[in-house]
Amino acid sequence: MKIGPKGQVTIPAKIRAAAGLLPHTEVEFRVTGGKVFLEKISGQPRGRKVIAAMRGRATRRMTTDQIMALTRGE
């Protein structure tokens, strides 16, 4: 594996899956003893961040039943 001209490298899919590295996962690099380590940053799960970002953005007040009917095309 080589580092590209922009300093980028592709993490193989098997390694991403084993480490739980999904798109938009925050990571950090650490250098220890001449070795470079990539570490997933712990914190709020991604789903909670997405929900928090969406909170308060609705433009209409709808019940869950109304939303379900709309998504089902009823």
Image (cartoon, grey):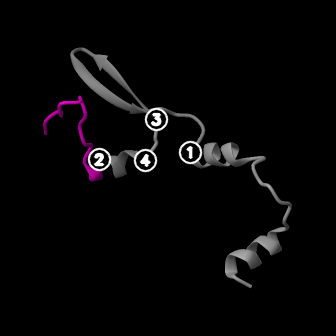
Say what amino acid the circle numbered 2 marks. Answer: Ile
- The x and y percentages for residue 30 are 34, 21
Say what amino acid the circle numbered 1 marks. Answer: Arg
Tell me how far mark 2 sits from mark 1, CA to CA: 19 Å
Tell me how far mark 4 sits from mark 1, CA to CA: 10 Å
Q: Residues within 10 Å of mark 1 (few under 14, many from 20)?
A: some
Q: Identify the secondary structure beneath mark 2.
A: helix
Q: Which residue is mark 2?
A: 15
Residue furthest to the front: 59
Looking at the image, is mark 2 or mark 1 earlier in the sequence? 2
Tell me how far mark 1 sits from mark 3, CA to CA: 9 Å
Q: Which residue is mark 1?
A: 46
Q: Identify the secondary structure beneath mark 4.
A: loop
Whether the magenta-drawn stretch holds residue 61 is answered as no
Say what amino acid the circle numbered 4 marks. Answer: Pro
Say what amino acid the circle numbered 3 marks. Answer: Glu
- The x and y percentages for residue 14 are 28, 52
Q: Residues within 10 Å of mark 2 (few under 14, many from 20)?
A: few
